[in-house]
Structure formats: C-alpha cells, structure tokens
Amino acid sequence: MMLRQTLSPTVAAQFDALVDESGSTLYFPLHSLEGQLAGYKVLHVVSGQEETVPATNCAGILAPRPGKGPRQQVAVLVPSVADTLALAGQKTAAQVVCLPHGLSHLPQQVLPSLEQYSKLVLWFGNDISSWDTSRNFAKKLDEKRCFLVRPMEKQPSPHVALFHGQDLRAIVSQAQPIWHQAITTFASLREDVLSELQNIEKVVMEAVEHATYVHDISHVIIDNVQFMMGVFEESRQMDRFWKQDAIIASFRTFATKKNCHVTLVIHPRKERDTEDLTSSSIFGSAKASQEADNILIIQDKRLTSLRGKKYLQVAKNRYTGDLGVMALEFDKASLSYGQKKKKPNIDKDTVMEDKTNLGKLCCADEFREIETWVGGLDGNN
C-alpha cells in the first residue's frame, strides 16, 4: 500500500524501467561504468518485494538516465528501488544511486562506478543493521567523502519518510560527515604504527584484508611472524619483541572484526634438546600465547631418542579446554605430515581360510613364504 502511493510511472521511466504484461512487476536495468547492462533490480509492486539478477556480485548500479547538463558530483546511495523512486521524485540536488544488493554486500566491481562522485550520502534506514552497514561501506568508499543520514526515529528510509510527508531534501542536506580529522580509531593508529615499524607488515595486512573482502577468505595462515618483522635486521632485542606484539595485536583485531580465522606460525626459542617445548617457548613476549585462542606445538623427538616420534600437541584450547597430542608420520605420496594411521587388525580365521587360495595363485617358493607368515599367526614357526 505504501509503495503504490509513492510509486510514480513518470519517475520510473527516468530509469528505463520495464513492466510485465500484468503490470505487477517492474524491471530496472543495472549498468556498469562502461554503460553495459549488468543485471536487473526486480520490483514486485503488490508485495513490495525486491530481488536482484544476478543474485550476487552484480557489477552495475541503478541510476537515472544521464541528462544533457554537467555530471553530478554528489550522489545519495540507497539500498532499494522504492527508496530510489522516492528520492528521484523529489528532485534533490544530488543524484540518487541504488546499490545492486542493498545492505547485504557491496561488490568490488561496483566501486569504479562510484568514483565519479566527490561526495556520497549514505541513507540506509534507521535500524542498527543499517548503521553498521553504513560504517562498513564507508570504509570501502573512502570515509572522507562519505556523509551519513543519521539513523534516528525521525529519519527512516526515504520511501517511508515520503509516505509520512517528510521533506527528503531537508534530510539529505542535514547529512553529517562520517570521518572527522580530529577523530581517529585505535585500528587506524595501529596501522600507522605498523607502517612506521616496517613497510612489509602493512603490505601483508592490506593483502589479507583485500583477500578477505574480495574472495571471502575465512582462514589466513602467516608463515612466519619472524620474517614479517625482519628478525634478521640489526635491531635491539626489545625492538623485535615490540614489533611482534604490534603484529599480533593487529591480527587479533582483524580476526575479531572480519570473523576470519588467523593462524600465525612462530618459531620457538632455543631450548635444550631433552626438554619439551611449551607455551613459554614461543619467541617474543607472552602476548602471543595470551591473545591466542589455540596453541599447537610440533614436538620432534626423533633426533634425541632412538624411538623418538614427531607429534602435534594441543597446548591451549580457549573454548573447550580439550588438550592432548597426536602422533604424526610422513606421507610420501602427499609429501606432508599427517595423523599416524593405525595398522589394520588382521583376522586370524580369515587368513587361515584364504591360505589355500593364496597358495593356488603362487609358485612353490612363494607359497612357503606365505605359509610361514600364516604359521606365525598360529604360533607355529
């Protein structure tokens, strides 16, 4: 009902919208930066439901047909077609742009289409989810050019505000900047500190964050931390510990904010060959073991004992508390270590039943070897 009262065929025509034969479904084309058709926003008029084709990673945006005048430098970003039509009908000073996938995600392919605007006003609604999404999207779009329509009760989404008779142009004009030069965050300070300590650390963090955003990476392995902080440089021991603590703090924050598992490989201190490695053997200060949710230690006793083994020890498990060891053996086929396989149990009766059949398939000498092996199971030598 709300959508029908705010929907204008004249405004919809500005976006080259198509309608089906029943008149109940509208199709709004999404175009890439080059003007190529990248998909459609589908609006079901009766239910008000919207969907995007393709459902993910659409490279296009919904914007009005370019006019003859100068290109707009300000754009209002909204998540839905209903919001787009509401703002377009009010003829604000800014151009309205509808994101292809609403608040669910912002594909990297869309970013070039938004580079033409010097100012972006994000109007996503007045709930907590909209507020969080606004801040996350602003980081991808450059916070310095992003302004936010504050999520307050009197400032709902554009089509709801229009339905209640609010002045949309006034709300847009009151948008506040997200970034302020006098305000910073601990995350920003940490990045600056890491950049000053050693450039390679910042490069790694940027690569990890980029991979997480673009490829939806859920597990990152850093091999190894000593290499990242330049352990072979001529620097004081305390400087290296400080660097390592800064790196670990940075990855701890990244793992929490991005919901991404991070595994850090840290070589141990030099210990006596006769002593097992412990959490205290981790190179650096105690911060590594304190921040870690899990600590896995590879123990290698093959060089100190004739029957020494190599095994993986779970030395810390923050959530379940289960600790223990797992024997490792080298698999030549995969050229890697894995859990030691148990030898299969041989059923004595089954072997005896197959004794005659095995003999029929072998020559006399081979049969004697098999008979000796089977006889060994019987206790007869």
Image (cartoon, grey):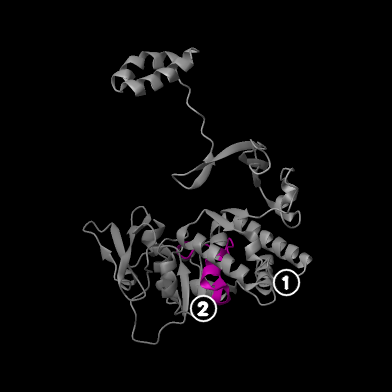
- What's drawn in magenta, residue-wise? 135-160
Q: Is residue 196 above or below residue 3?
A: below
Q: Is residue 346 left or right of residue 181?
A: left
Q: Is residue 228 above or below residue 91?
A: above
Q: Look at the numbered discs 1 and 2 and tell me whether their residues touch, using CB distance below 8 Å.
A: no
Q: Position of residue 318 (x, y in %)?
A: 67, 43
Q: Position of residue 365 (x, y in %)?
A: 35, 22
Residue 291 visible in the picture: yes
Which disc is residue 119 wearing? 2
- Name the one closer to the observer, 178 or 219: 219
Determine which quarter of the picture holds residue 51.
Answer: bottom left
Q: Determine the residue positioned at 44% across, 44% down.
A: 333
Q: What kind of residue is marked 1?
A: Glu
Q: Position of residue 319 (x, y in %)?
A: 65, 41
Residue 150 visible in the picture: no
Residue at mark 1:
234
Q: CA distance from mark 1 to mark 2?
A: 46 Å
Q: Is residue 334 above or below residue 201?
A: above
Q: What kind of residue is marked 2?
A: Lys
Q: Earlier in the sequence, mark 1 or mark 2?
A: 2
Q: How many marks?
A: 2
